Amino acid sequence: MLLQRKSPYEQAASYLCKLYGQVMSVSDYIAENAVEIRLRAGRPIVVETADKRHTIGGAAVSAESISECVTAFCDYSIHSYRRELSEGFVTLRGGHRAGFSGTAVYENGKIGTIKDISSINLRIAREHRGIAERLAGIVTDNSNFGGMLIIGEPLSAKTTMLRDLCRLVGAARKVAVIDERSEIAAMYKGEPQHSIGVNTDVLDGFLKSGGIELALRSLSPQYIMCDEIDSEFARLCGCISNGVRLVLTAHCGSIEELKRSHRICEVVEAAGINYIALLDKGKNIGKVKGLWYIANDEDIFSCDSGSNLCGGRLFGGGYARQTCGRA
Amino acid sequence: MKTLIRYRACRIDELITICAANEAYDGLDFLHVLSEYSGSAAEITLHWNECVNAQGTLTADAKNQLCALGGQLGRSDIEGQLNCLSLFTVRIEQALAEMQAEYEKKRKVLRSLGIYGGIAAAIIIL
């Protein structure tokens, strides 16, 4: 059952109980382009589009409304969402993600839950078919392809890009997607809510370690895709057999920032990644700002400026000069 | 229900669906009505009181207890839910004990009435 009847904005807003009417009072432009709905206790609702913040008129959001929304996000079953609440976010039907801030309650030195939730960031998941066509060409039609890392700042549509890449690559190749936060496929009762390709297997809710292990053992994928890698990921790369290619995403605003980040460089090295795509944001959200090819494990070439050496070493402490135009 | 919450962390709609399919709860028709809303925990929460109050075979006190339980289900973490269920179990056991005591009392009164009625009938016949 695909959630096609309601727009993504309406789907997300339907979790906001009494605030639904207020959130739905925005113009069609805002509803179609909204990326986040922000609720903060005692303050007005803010809807964020890629290029602007829009403050919604009407009463300020009350603490009770926030509490009611949190209960709704948890399907009126707080006890079923303990792990998610302790991690500070809940993934909703349709792949939308509600993040919280409030007062931390520690248990045995770890955050057990968050109480007195004072603000909610509801991120709206959208499908943008076709945005990954260029990257899909590299992933599937390139004999030198070893793996790809998609980087970008927050709100640069990394997950949306990965989702479309799943759909395009999964149309012809076997893909296993480790959907730890249920954002890529947005599985509901075993069916994906987004189009992710006919040959794509979804490991929904799996931690990356367990998901990769299971995929390699039983799904024989040609590609494994994961969103938002962490520092632990490099350790997992060792168990990935030859012939399986990784496509990953990571928070990182530029190639220079990537070079400074040891944890990401470690992953790039361990996973045999040889393509790095940097995503744009703001008005150019969903576009590839720069694309690099890593040769000889460390030299970086810009794919947009021919085969010339861009100038720099990824792991050697040098620098990469980006000379690429927009994709 | 405690097992479903403790070991499976079932959502409200899953709990209702499983309980409605369990023969042990056959007398609780409202569970069957609520299970029609399976897949929507919001609808279940919204219609809980309405369905409980529509069941004719329950006493007013039992309805009150079930409505109060509906207001607490899903509103806290697993520990909270288990404590809440324990509390309602105690309350329901108390109510049951009171009903049994009342039944015993009424049974004695009826038996006495039966004896006196029998004696009266015998006297009239004689």
Image (cartoon, coloured by chain):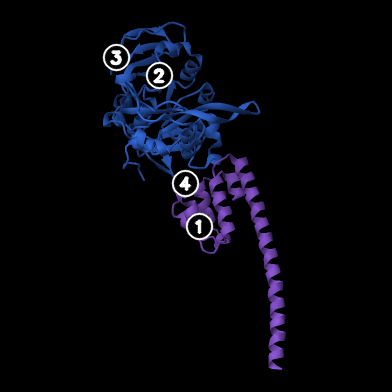
Chain colours: A blue, B purple
- Camera-nearest label, 1 or 2: 1
Residue marked by disc 4: B41
Q: Which structural element holds mark 4?
A: helix
Numbered disc in front, either 4 or 3: 4
Q: Are marks 4 and 3 on the same chain?
A: no
Mark 1 chain: B
The quadrant in which residue A53 appears is top left
Q: CA distance from mark 3 to mark 1?
A: 69 Å
Of marks 1 and 4, which one's residue comes earlier in the chain?
4
Q: How much space separates mark 1 and mark 4, taking CA atoms?
A: 19 Å
Residue density around tag 1, few if under 14, some if 14–19, many if 20 or more, within 10 Å:
some
Foreground of the two, B114 or B65 = B114
Give the foreground label among 1 and 4. Answer: 1
Q: Which residue is mark 2?
A: A153
Amino acid beneath label 3: Asp
Asked if the residue at tag 1 contacts the one at tag 3, i.e. Cβ–Cβ closer than 8 Å, the answer is no
Secondary structure beneath dot 2 equals loop
Work out whether residue A109 or residue A66 is closer to the camera in this orientation and state it: A66
Q: Position of residue A154 (x, y in %)?
A: 41, 21
Q: Give the mark toward the camera: 3 or 1.
A: 1
Residue that label 1 marks: B53
Quadrant for residue A302, please give it. Answer: top left
Label 3 – label 2 distance at C-alpha: 21 Å
Which amino acid type corresponds to the residue marked 2 in the rendered image?
A: Glu
